[in-house]
Amino acid sequence: MVKLASLLLLAPFGFAQAPTAQLTGTIRDASGAVVPNAQIAATNEDTGLKRTASSNELGYYAVPLLPPGLYRMTVQKEGFRTVQRKGLRLHVNDRVTADYSLEVGSLAETLSVTAEAPLLQTEQASRGAVIDNAKIVNLPLNGRNPFSLAALAPGVQPGGGFFTARVFQEQVNQSNFTANGGASFQNDILLDGTSNTVAGHGQLAMTPSVDAIEEFKVQTSNYSAEYGRSGGGIINIVTKSGTNQLRGTVYEFLRNKVLDSGNFFNNRAGIPRQPFVYNQYGFTSGGPVYLPKLYDGRNRTFFFLSYEGVKVRRARFFNGTVPTEAMRRGDFNELRTAAGQPILIYNPFSTRQQGSGYVRDLFPTNRIPASLHDPVAVNASKYIPLPNQQMPTVAQNLIANASQGNNLDMWQWRGDHNFSAANRMFVRLSYDKQEDNAPNF
């Protein structure tokens, strides 16, 4: 079975479900009076993206559509000292308040704010938690399924398959969780602001690599009306983009059978421990687009590329029923019920009417003569293995193992460009190919 999902997202404008943050607040002077027409600038310290705003007649300002990241805030007004605050960490869907008090002085004088109370969420009532990049990268994940970390949010209860490695599981199970008692498989998972699930089914179109995710937010209740496709919770994922510094990672996670124990049924049947290999590897690379003597994309144009491959080889266990050597010759005397009573075989060609019903004759000594054996069935039975277990009723007389191969190749490319303080765009291309090769027992 081959699964293929290709997704192209083009976001030149702000969508209703844009995975961005917003800063709001009020500018006042030392006496507490509001300060209108103050100039506010929010600058991303990694990409140089700068967005500006000005306070209104009530001293209120709003800087929307800020991609998650680390920001530097600057507030300026003629006749007052410049106020600068560094290290503002904004997360996906943040709506936070940052108020500032200006002191009389010259614009050339800068007052740096270094010890200020943490930003508060006062603009929205949604409940949930942000899973930041440090948790995504550093917390242990079996199979590196990023959605397993959604269980870190209060009120989230994982369902069946939620913690299962994605290469072993249908992608539909990766969104099987309940949020504050909501319905499972009714959650909406957004990827860079666009729904990544099939409505009503919870099936995912794309599961991004752990190393390609910047952060995501789990909203469990009281989220705003813009999220209208969910009967449960919301996961809003932001993928990584390039910055002004060239950065990259290379990784590999390997598991094998060395420390694994044998299957209980294999041990009982004397079958040795079967092979198991789980190899997960990849790389990421991101930075500014820089072409010597042609184009310097610092503070403007960025790229990010990631690849992840998974190669899994594991033994699958099978316990079934196959015909014995005597049965293949037509002798069914060893076919018995659970109580030990023989199961009798009737000749279908002897069917005849008797009264209001039909009757058939038993095969003598419960054996089907060779003249009635179908030659095709006789030849096909040569490919069916013989029993390897002695069972009182013949049932479940075969234990077999076979290798199942699972392969996953996933590429993701993203390009960001800042046209100006008011206009930016990004393009992301994701490619996911998964092959599940069913074992032949």
Image (cartoon, rainbow, N blue to C red):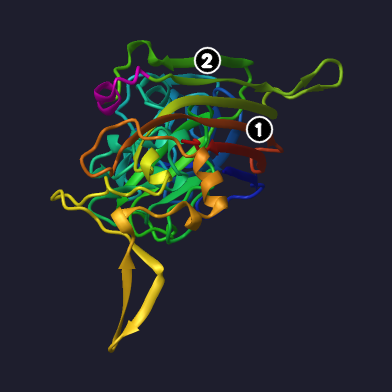
Residue that lies at the very extreme toward the bottom in this rendered image = 356
Residue that numbered label 2 is attached to: 251
Task: Give the main secondary structure of the magenta stretch.
Answer: helix
Look at the numbered discs 1 and 2 and tell me whether their residues touch, using CB distance below 8 Å: no
Q: Is residue 8 above or below residue 416?
A: below
Q: Is residue 179 above or below residue 312?
A: below
Q: Nearer the viewer, residue 297 or 278?
A: 278
Q: Amino acid at mark 2?
A: Tyr
Q: How many marks?
A: 2
The residue beneath circle 1 is 413
SS class of the residue under badge 2?
Answer: strand
Which residue appears farthest toward the left when viewing the image?
339
**Residue 238 marker:** none
Q: Position of residue 64 (x, y in %)?
A: 51, 45
Horizontal side of 49 relative to 200 (left or right) equals right
Question: Magenta includes 112?
Answer: no
Q: Measuring 49% from the left and 34% from the top, which residue is drawn there? A: 68
Give the magenta-colored segment's residue range: 264-273
Within 10 Å of disc 2 (Cα), the crowding (few <14, some 14-19, many 20+) is few
Say whether disc 1 or disc 2 marks the residue closer to the N-terminus.
Answer: 2
- For label 1, the SS is strand
Instruction: Compare residues 72 and 158 and report the one nearer the observer.
Output: 158
